[in-house]
Image (cartoon, helix red, strand yellow):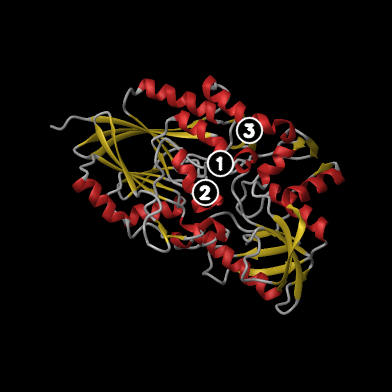
Amino acid sequence: MARARQLTVVQMNDSHAYFDLHPELFWQGGGATYKRVGGYARIATLLQQIRRERAGRVLALDCGDTLHGTYPAVQSHGRALIPILNELALDTMTAHWEFAYGPAGFRELAHELDYPVLASNCYEQDTDALLFPPYSVREIGDVRVGIIGIAATIIDKTMPPFFSEGIYLTLGKRELPGYIRRLREQERVDIVIVLSHLGFPQDAQLAHDVPGIDVLLSGHTHHRLYRPALVNGALIIQSGSQASFVGRLDLTLEDGRVTDYQHALITLDESIPPDPRVEELVRAALAPHREYLAQVVGTTEMPLDRYGILEATMDNLLLQSLLELTGAQVAFSNGWRYGAPILPGPITVNDLWNIIPVNPPVSLCQLTGQEIWDMLEENLEHTFSRDPYQQMGGYVKRGLGLRLYIKIENPPGLRIQELYVGDERVEPDRLYEVAYVTSQGVPAKYGSRRRELDVHGVEALSRYIARHKQVSAPLRGTVVAI
């Protein structure tokens, strides 16, 4: 009879460079509530506790969206995170927003990490060579572990073009069976773990389509899985976002398969003391920016967050600022998922950068009514496609100045039932003046008379809040599922 062996996998995903404590939203029976959680110093403490408890049998993995997302990270092109991440002593990671520094910039960052970046689906355009190693083999105690990385496939499809300069990405589905065979037959691993940034719907479909995965660590969609999903023999977990949670998976293995497991989604609340060494590294990373980011620009009457798939209060505030700045009829922004909530009370400069850390210029263009219709249908398909592999990340595109009535369950191109700008039905041939931020707000194939203003997103927000002193951005029913 084979001897049972133990392995603990600790997952971090979508931390988005949230260095320290921040407000987080939690759903309860009576609705939303908020508390302060998170930060890398608490992750460090938790990792140390688990490593002591499970001596020599712990694997710590990061699904990516780590080196981008807050002002100190973006201003340093990700380098402010490097000493902190190296102190955590992770085993490996994969990526998504890391490509915001360009593939060459990201590869430079990867060389500064003490552990490898894995991406079995990311290739150089000129040579078809892999940009990063596809897999890693780790000896964790008496368990030989094979880890295959899959980076976000949308990097060269819906993200700004400079994210994918000189590279292309596949879904990873075609490559995965070959790497699983190599790990099983040549590397003689005891367990195969897929480290993915595709998103939970795609990861569940991938596990269904590709046999031989023991554990799939999922990122990108910010799901809080309080128990694993079991698909085609693969255990799938995902552990929230913004360094607010860590996932723990305790595995028992016999004869090269998982025979038992225990899972916990751990909230990094203030009951977990910060590790002093990492806390000092965090303090040093934030020190050059602390005075600037602490400036108060106004107040909010209500909590602002980004947790609604159809509409969100945080994005309504951004769109209100665009409409007031430009006088446009309609404003659009991307359906981002990142961004810690802002509680009623003071709004700081730090909050503004958390809303839109890419800080793109405010732009204007003209769209025909038909283009608005087609753009929104495309976005709805990217969000709700019945084929998970066609889902392209993010929530529904944010809009203000319009009202959209949809049937989510309808086929592609047929979801919109009614579309209004102001109080009038959209006319297909009419031109509408539209304000937007980033190419994801209005993709380049739509519109005419495009022009950038000499005002960026953070400044637009700051001006709007300073003018109104106290702001509110309630849900307006902009997108209604009927």
- Mark carried by residue 105: 2
Name the residue type under label 1: Gly
Position of residue 15 relative to residue 387, above or below, is above
Name the residue type under label 2: Gly
Identify the mark nearer the N-term, 3 or 2: 3
Name the quarter where the C terminus is drawn.
bottom right
Nearer to us of marks 3 and 2 is 2
Question: Does residue 390 appear anywhere in the picture?
Answer: yes
Label 2 environment density (alpha carbons within 10 Å; few <14, some 14–19, many ≥20): some
- Contact flag, marks 1 and 3 (Cβ < 8 Å): no
Residue at the extreme bottom of the image, as rendered: 429
- Contact flag, marks 1 and 2 (Cβ < 8 Å): yes
Q: For mark 3, what is the residue?
A: 22
Q: Identify which residue is drawn at 42% across, 59% down.
A: 124
Name the quarter where the N terminus is drawn.
top left
Label 3 environment density (alpha carbons within 10 Å; few <14, some 14–19, many ≥20): some
Q: For mark 1, what is the residue?
A: 78
Q: Position of residue 414 (x, y in %)?
A: 57, 72
* In-front residue for pair 453/37: 453
